[in-house]
Image (cartoon, rainbow, N blue to C red):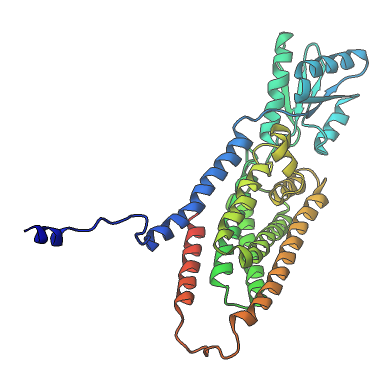
Amino acid sequence: MSGGHKAGRVAPVDVRTAPSNPALRHVLTHLITPLLMCLGMGLAYLGAFATPEPHHLPVAVVGAGPEAKVFAQTVKDKAGDKLDVRTVADRATAVDQLKHRDITGAYVLSAKAPELIVASAGSDMSATAVEKVFTPVAGAHGVPLKITDVVPPVSGDPTGSGIFFLLIAVSIGSYASVAALGAAGAGLSLRLRAVLVAGVSLAVSVIGAAFAGPLFHLVDHGLWGVWAMSWLYSAGILFLGVGLHTFLKRWTTLAVMVLFVMLNFTSSGGLFRPELQNGFFGGLHAFWNGAGLVEGIRDLVYFGGHDLARNVWVLAAWLVLGLAVLAVAGLAERRRAPAAAPAGAAPATAAPSGAALAEAAEEEEEVEEAVGV
């Protein structure tokens, strides 16, 4: 009986030596990307948008003589670093500076009829911030404040935020196509992928122009310029993303989300101009491609082309960067090719290996993951 009892015992299993579950490990690996996206999106959006506060917001006091200077200094002393206050001699000069985007608002001194001049097409949030500063000033003297908007947005985009949502649409069409062109198109020649990038960016820009013009009337003129800047923007993202895919593979989706969503939307100025953001996102606004598109469209449509050239150059610089990364990727792929196909390799008609099938499955998952995001 003792011997039978011993024979029926099951030896304990040491979980430390048990074989791991490949399917579970595969799923956990793929969960890293969405969790990092969750972390990154929270840090970026809450860091950029949660607590908007003026930082050196440029405003002007309209008036001549010591009274205007004393008033401007009083406003500056109360506001501290929130405002940069200057004085201008007359209303026409203030309007001119608003239309050149040198200031965000101008307060016209008057004991009986004070006036605040803004250009809300440049940023509705910035105009609102200026109103919050000067409305109590007029109220303290017991007089109503007249608000004049010298550059209002078009009727199809009453809040001026439509350009920001246009940026989002064009961005999604661009970075979601990166996975399809980079992963599914990995077997194509670099030249053919470049042609596809040009074609896709053209299609995305045409869709963007249709949104901006005939569909939602976000702009009432300059549609050709909006299309051209949208193409520059989309092509820059696509060339850069497809080039990065050669090196990052399935991590490309996370990389383009960081570059063209987390850092891009938050620094574009579409909702908050840099004067209402912290130094990090305000600094990115000076050279990031989303800001180039948003501010370029604003300059073209509302501000007579002022500073348009600089924003176009920003978009062109990102396109050049994308072309450079794609060229480097082409060199890397050519160097890998001999190692991937050594002498005596199996002919092309041979059945695909397990590694090749796994790579194909990985590419399909990457495309689905990117499109889902």
- Quarter of image, res 269: top right
Query: Viewer-proximal residue, 65 or 360?
Result: 360
State the image coordinates of residue 365 (x, y, percent, origin top left). 46, 64
Image check: 139 left or right of 348? right
User: Can the viewer see residue 358 in this picture?
Assistant: yes
| Residue pictured at 58% horizontal, 68% vertical | 181
Query: Viewer-proximal residue, 208 or 17?
Result: 17
Image check: 21 left or right of 359? left
- Quarter of image, res 85: top right
Query: Viewer-proximal residue, 26 or 10?
Result: 10
State the image coordinates of residue 171 (x, y, percent, origin top left). 61, 54
User: Can the viewer see residue 156 in this picture?
Assistant: no
State the image coordinates of residue 179 (x, y, percent, origin top left). 56, 64
In this rendering, the answer to whether 73 lies above or below 286 is above
Residue sticking out furthest to the right = 65
The N terminus sits in image quarter: bottom left
In this rendering, the answer to whether 357 lies above or below 277 is below
| Residue pictured at 52% horizontal, 88% vertical | 348
Residue sticking out furthest to the left = 1
State the image coordinates of residue 224 (x, y, percent, origin top left). 72, 58
| Residue pictured at 67% horizontal, 69% vertical | 198
